[in-house]
Image (cartoon, grey):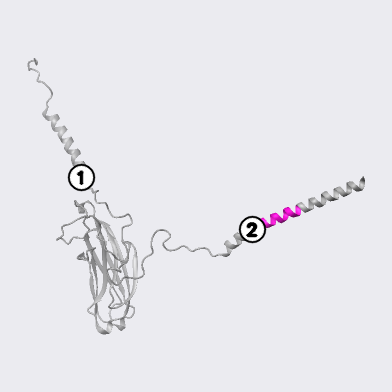
Amino acid sequence: MRSTARKTHRGRARRGARALTAAALLVGAALAGLAAPAGAAAASPAPTASAGEDGEPPAPTEAGTSFRTATAVRPGQRATAQASTGDYLYWQFPADAGDRATVRATVTLPDTSARKTGTTWRIDVYDGLRRRQACRFGSDAKSLPAGGAGSVELACHLRTVRGSAEPWSDDPLPGAYYVRLTAVDLGAADIGLGFGAALDVSLDEAGAAAHVDGKLAAPLVQGSASTVEPEDGWASGWWSTRWLWTAGGAALAALAGIWGYGLTRGRGRPAGAPPAR
């Protein structure tokens, strides 16, 4: 009886040891499976954040060579480009009704001793219909003598963009505006010399004085390689501060009518008047 009990006890112990071994193997396999993806994730390189992940596109570092390939620039950005003397550089930016745009360009010539003749640099601004827009003030053209200063700054302050205008008026209208930078009156020896260009565009709100009745059916944005649009979209055109002036004038007119009626109606029947029948 004692031997049988010992055998039964030994069998139970062996079975318990086997169960514990199996459980340990299962736990080890589970831990290895969890560690493998973590190790792979640690070994793989972390993705780098792109410049446009936050929703703000990076400032352009090149310029187009025609209206159709003009590089889009957002107001407040500083666009840069490298080119050769004699090239035409094109950028475009959006301007909505009531905006006053200011365009500033800086040209840097790295090797001033290589210039043999004087050069005139200029910027021209065109609207969505490719009509050249005159500057209210600013130096949109400057001349550099041969071997003179290594940089030149140009500026053009445009007129206020109107919501609508007569076809013959040539007034600025909402849409895309194109900036062209180039050198004129070049000597043959200066063509092809390298230079750097930087462009800054800023927009100011003109206020209620610039508001007009009417609006365009669509902004003047022609087909091009880039699409320009204000950050908050194009203005609908129905809202204007004139609505506030109209509502205020109507309220004042109503108050004036009530006040005038109170003056003319008197205080009722005179004291000595006979009673009404």
Secondary element at tag 1: helix
Number of marks in the image?
A: 2
Split into 4 quadrants, where in the image is the C terminus?
top left
Left or right, 129 with reference to 26: left
Q: Residues within 10 Å of mark 1 (few under 14, many from 20)?
A: few
The image quadrant that residue 140 belongs to is bottom left
The image quadrant that residue 44 belongs to is bottom right
Please, what is the dominant secondary structure of the magenta stretch? Answer: helix
The image quadrant that residue 250 belongs to is top left
Residue 23 among magenta residues: yes
Indicate the amino acid at tag 2: Gly
Q: Which mark is residue 191?
A: none
Q: Where does residue 167 sit, x and y in percent of width and height?
A: 16, 59
Left or right, 202 with reference to 28: left
Secondary element at tag 2: helix
Tell me if residue 118 comes above or below residue 265 in the rendering.
below
The residue lying at 21 percent from left, 47 percent from top is 242
The residue lying at 23 percent from left, 73 percent from top is 142
Left or right, 19 with reference to 62: right
Q: Residues within 10 Å of mark 2 (few under 14, many from 20)?
A: few
Tell me if residue 29 comes above or below residue 149 in the rendering.
above
Front one among 151 and 183: 183
Q: Nearer the viewer, mark 1 or mark 2?
A: 2
Q: Find the magenta span and give its range.
A: 20-30
Residue 84 among magenta residues: no
Indicate the amino acid at tag 1: Trp
Split into 4 quadrants, where in the image is the N terminus?
top right
> Which residue is the site of mark 1?
245
Q: Where does residue 118 sit, x and y in percent of width and height?
A: 24, 80
Q: Where does residue 261 sit, x and y in percent of width and height?
A: 13, 30
> Which residue is the site of mark 2?
33
- Specify which label sits upstream in the sequence, 1 or 2: 2
